[in-house]
Amino acid sequence: MTDDMTDLATLPGTHAHVWEALARGVTARDAPCRFAVLATVGDGGAARMVVLRDCDATAATVEVHSDLMADKVAELRAEPRATLLFWLPGDQLQIRLRARFDVVSGATVEARWQGIPNGPRRAYGGMPPPGCALATPSDHDDTPQRDRFAVLIGAVQQIETLHLGTPHRRAVFRRADGFAGGWIAP
Amino acid sequence: MTDDMTDLATLPGTHAHVWEALARGVTARDAPCRFAVLATVGDGGAARMVVLRDCDATAATVEVHSDLMADKVAELRAEPRATLLFWLPGDQLQIRLRARFDVVSGATVEARWQGIPNGPRRAYGGMPPPGCALATPSDHDDTPQRDRFAVLIGAVQQIETLHLGTPHRRAVFRRADGFAGGWIAP
């Protein structure tokens, strides 16, 4: 905790802390960055919980998986710009990634599909498709469908952090200047 | 936990569970619904953590407070439709409220302002305003400003729940039919 708070007192430390926390979210099921909120424009602001599946600090990219027929895919195809929001209670740190998402499916994502066990594959596919009316919840066939598996790859354009320490520290890092970063008013 | 899971097996039980959880979020600092994500359209999908300040199950309204100069206020004035998202880890339940937000400030919210202690009042006001560049985080004057206090009142149009039990249960309740509710495919 002391190290974390030292990290968050500088811009390079804050930037490094973000990517380290995201990397832990990818690999550790109980890490705070395992789950994020993906906020899309939708029909009025839309949001849902997602799982962070991969990240790359050098390329500044993040990866989320989805059923190809989920609303978020249609929404990202209409407007690829979205926010991925993380909350780290132990650090009292909010991380907001503004990213531009590509929806990738088909043969390109075969290697990813092969890495997913049978149980979790049931998140991709299912009849009727997401959002259709059901008489009861058990009237849903969740057989996995390989062709419904989509990888959402976000190219991070901006990272914004808000650390609720004393003082509150808010920073913004933009791809345009190599994520050099600057402090802004909270 | 057993009671909760029984609640979530029926539509009226799910609807009641949502409002009970929201009410606990308003009054209990450690309740899972204390914090929510407010997702607005913004310039691409935008999102941030907020605190649930009040809710009314009968009127189907929720309340969040903000600095009048925060981006979320400008975004809600441009597009009042937004999503308030909650995640209840103990219940494995996601709650999504689609609401239309009014921004209220000035004399109308005087009683609310009087109820806020001096420390938390520092969230409303401050110079320079939110998002302006700072040389260091301590270059921010967080003196409270009564005229910068805004109450965001959301009239809930739709409640959507996703319960990650077995089977997954997803329900939608709409204001248009008195929140009668129906099951939909997850």
Image: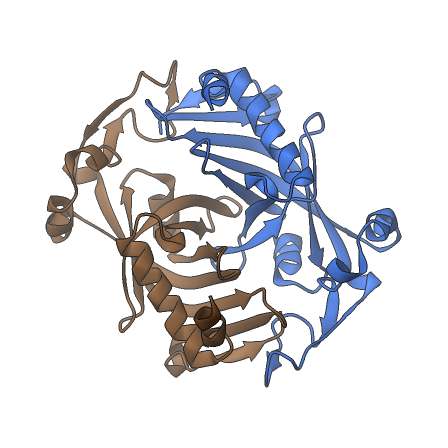
Chain colours: A brown, B blue
As displayed, is residue A122 above or below residue A62? Answer: above
Pick the front one: B128 or B138: B138
Residue at (46% x, 31% y) in the render: B91
Residue at (87% x, 47% y) in the render: B111
Does residue A154 appear anywhere in the picture? no
Quadrant holding the C terminus of chain B = top left
**Is B146 left, or right, of B79 in this rendering?**
right
As displayed, is residue A174 above or below residue A95? Answer: below
Q: How many marks?
A: 0
**Is B68 left, or right, of A126 in this rendering?**
right
Measured as percent of width and height from the top left, residue B166 is found at 33, 23
Using the rendered view, name the quadrant where residue A175 is placed.
bottom left
Measured as percent of width and height from the top left, residue A33 is found at 38, 55
**Is B62 left, or right, of A154 in this rendering?**
right
Q: Residue furthest front?
A: A2
Does residue A169 appear anywhere in the picture? yes
Residue at (47% x, 16% y) in the render: B6
Pick the front one: A105 or B7: B7
Q: Residue furthest bottom?
A: B135
Measured as percent of width and height from the top left, residue B56 is found at 71, 31
Measured as percent of width and height from the top left, residue B99 is found at 61, 39
As displayed, is residue B100 above or below residue A62? Answer: above
Residue at (43% x, 21% y) in the render: B183
